[in-house]
Image: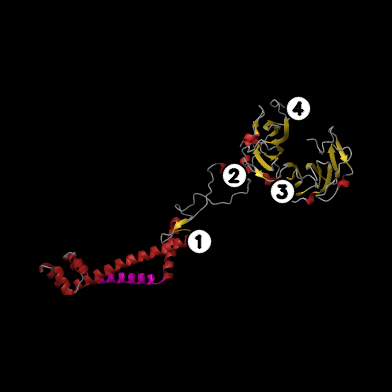
Amino acid sequence: PKNRNVEPEVLMESLFKLSALETRFPVNMNVLDARGSPGVMGLRQALRAFLDHRREVLVRRARFRLDKIEARLHILDGLVIAFLNLDEVIRIVRYEDEPKAKLIEAFELSDIQADAILNTRLRQLAKLEEMELRREHAELAEERAGLLKMLASEPAQWKLVGVGLKDVRAILGPDTKLGKRRSIFDTAPVVDAEAAIEAMIVREPITVILSERGWIRAAKGKVEDPSELKFKEGDKLGLIVPAETTDKLLIFASDGRFFTIGCDKLPGARGHGEPLRLMLDLDDKTDIIDMFPHKPGTKRVIASKEGYGFILPEEEAISFRRAGKQVLNAGTKGAAFAMPVAGDHLGVIGDNGKVLIFPLAELPEMPRGKGVKLQSYREGGLRDAIVFNALDGATWIDSAGRTRVWGEWRDWLAKRAAAGKLAPKGFPTSKRFKPK
């Protein structure tokens, strides 16, 4: 990290987000089932299919083994007959021209049994003992009976599946060398994703400068005297706001859209900056109404010049898309202002010079839209507004820059959407609470 103020959890989350230290992937189990048909399975269905497969393998192995046992028992039956008639068998094998046919005829043997007797050396045949043959026959017969019983009972099959899974667990269990997990599943800490990226940015104070023609730049530290700033010929200062490199800069346009730019991505102040319209999707007909750094939890009163507005949580205005985010339905006259909610009353003034004050609680809080009517006008529209606390009282700034206390502001208090009354004596001729 570039400074020591970064929290370890935030730094690690930034590494996880920006590198391959952490991998997250969705599981889409689009599979072929036992019949070869494609489909999507959930975890329960997939486990059931796996268990069914284990049972099917068990049954097929049992049937395969059963066939081998039947074949061996058939041969053992022939060898027992040969042992019981050993002298005659030896005579036939030694002296008959067609011993196989003679053996089949003499002892009612099958081709397989006759071949097994003929493929056994006479010396070995002589050494065969009846008890040994019958012992092997009994063991295989017992195994055959067990397999037949298992094949006839589904619960017995599932019991053996369980035994097989226990054997697998003994080899691949979580405590074994082969089965020990290399990676882990864990719950990710609750960390702001944007803050994780900001952890790699050095937090420094800056001053964001926007000219009237839309050139933007960021000067390090605080600009003490804005009059010393230089601009291109024919251009001058439009907006200037203090911020930090880790801030998100919100830009409010006359068409009701909000744009967001990371302050660390702003051009430096060595030159005249860069045209804001090249950084955002802004045409020449759209003006910049306001610009301010985002402060979490802040709410703003936004309104159109047609006299409609609402309270907007700043979080709803954030969008890093070049096209911005349409928040206010500004109508044909465009947006008027986006001022922070720093009080409990709202005072508005129209182009006609009439002032109306009403409680801020009469405005709805919305993420986007047109809002409700703030003030009624026969002609013209909304010019300016002020948010203030009733206990502190309302003020305005005159043309000389002096703050004037408005002691009788309650005389202009009325319901929202009323026409209001003409501004008091001494009110600025610009019909604004503060100079623009």
Three-letter residue code for mark 1: Arg
Marks 3 and 4, how far apart at CA? 38 Å
Give the magenta part as a residue range. Answer: 133-153
Residue 384 among those drawn in magenta: no
Q: Are marks 3 and 4 in contact (CB under 8 Å)?
A: no
On screen, residue 365 versus residue 139, left or right, reads right
Q: Quadrant of the N terminus?
A: top right
Q: Residues within 10 Å of mark 2 (few under 14, many from 20)?
A: many
Residue drawn at point x = 15 percent, y = 68 percent = 100
Secondary structure beneath label 3: loop
Q: Are marks 3 and 1 in contact (CB under 8 Å)?
A: no
Marks 2 and 1, how far apart at CA? 32 Å
Q: Give the labeled residue for mark 4.
A: 227
Mark 2 or mark 1: which comes first in sequence?
Answer: 2
Marks 2 and 4, how far apart at CA? 43 Å
> Residue lying furthest front in this view?
379
| Image coords of residue 8 (percent x, y) | 62, 42
Three-letter residue code for mark 4: Ser
Tell me the tag on residue 13. 2
Tell me the tag on residue 370. 3
164 or 352: nearer the eye? Answer: 352
Asked whether residue 25 is in view, the answer is: yes
Q: Are marks 2 and 1 in contact (CB under 8 Å)?
A: no
Residue 135 among those drawn in magenta: yes
